[in-house]
Structures are given as C-alpha cells and as structure tokens.
C-alpha cells in the first residue's frame, strides 16, 4: 500500500497517509476532507555499493581520491 503526501486546503496542514483502495482521506488537524494530493518523489535504496552506477577505478575517476585531484 502506498503512502501519499497531502495538504489540507482548509488549514494548510501537510500530512502523510497510508492509502488502501477505498481509504477516505481527511486532515488529521481539522478533520476536513478538502485535501489535495501533493506531488512527491521516491528513492530506491541500493542493497550494496556494487549496485550503484558510476565510474569505477578502471574508468580512471570517480571523485577526488578516485583520480580527480591527486590526493593519493
């Protein structure tokens, strides 16, 4: 079940709600059902550093100590 972010149009309160298929959403502060779903972003969690994209040591870089600034 997804968690959505909402903003109440009555009291301007922002809140999150776990939404099931038929969940009615109301503001937890003023109990108004005049709410607006906010546009939100998500982030995928990598399970290891090997799963992260980017240049490796064989590609000659990847930050300061990866060959970019001479801090060896």
Image (cartoon, rainbow, N blue to C red):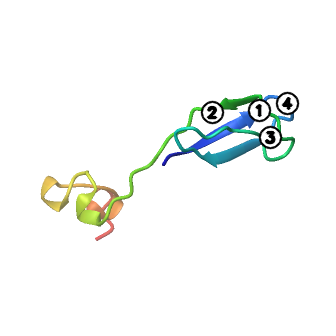
Nearest to the observer: residue 51 or residue 12 = 12
Residue 66 in the image: x percent, y percent? 27, 61
Find residue 11 and report its horizontal and vertical position in percent.
86, 35
Residue, disc 2: 38
Helix or strand or loop: what does disc 3 sit on? loop
Q: Secondary structure at mark 4?
A: loop
Q: Is residue 67 left or right of residue 2?
A: left
Q: Which mark is residue 10?
A: 4
Q: Nearer the viewer, mark 2 or mark 4?
A: 4
Q: Earlier in the sequence, mark 3 or mark 1?
A: 3
State which quadrant residue 5 falls in.
top right
Q: Residue at x 57, y 44 (%)?
A: 19
Q: Secondary structure at mark 2?
A: loop
Q: Does dot 1 land on a helix, a strand or a loop? A: loop
Image quadrant of residue 58? bottom left
2 to 63, vertically: above or below = above
Q: Which mark is residue 20?
A: none
Residue 30 spot, x, y in % from top left:
87, 41
Q: Residue at x 29, y 65 (%)?
A: 49
Front-most of residues 70 and 48: 48
C-alpha gap between disc 2 and disc 1: 15 Å
Q: Which residue is mark 3?
A: 13
N-terminal label among 1 and 4: 4
């Amino acid at each position: 079940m997804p968690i959505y972010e909402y903003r109440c149009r009555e009291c301007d309160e922002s809140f999150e709600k776990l939404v099931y298929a038929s969940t009615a959403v109301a503001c937890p502060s003023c109990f108004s059902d005049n709410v607006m779903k906010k546009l939100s972003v998500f982030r995928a969690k990598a399970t290891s550093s090997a799963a992260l994209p980017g240049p490796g040591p064989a590609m000659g870089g990847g930050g300061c100590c990866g060959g970019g600034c001479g801090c060896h």
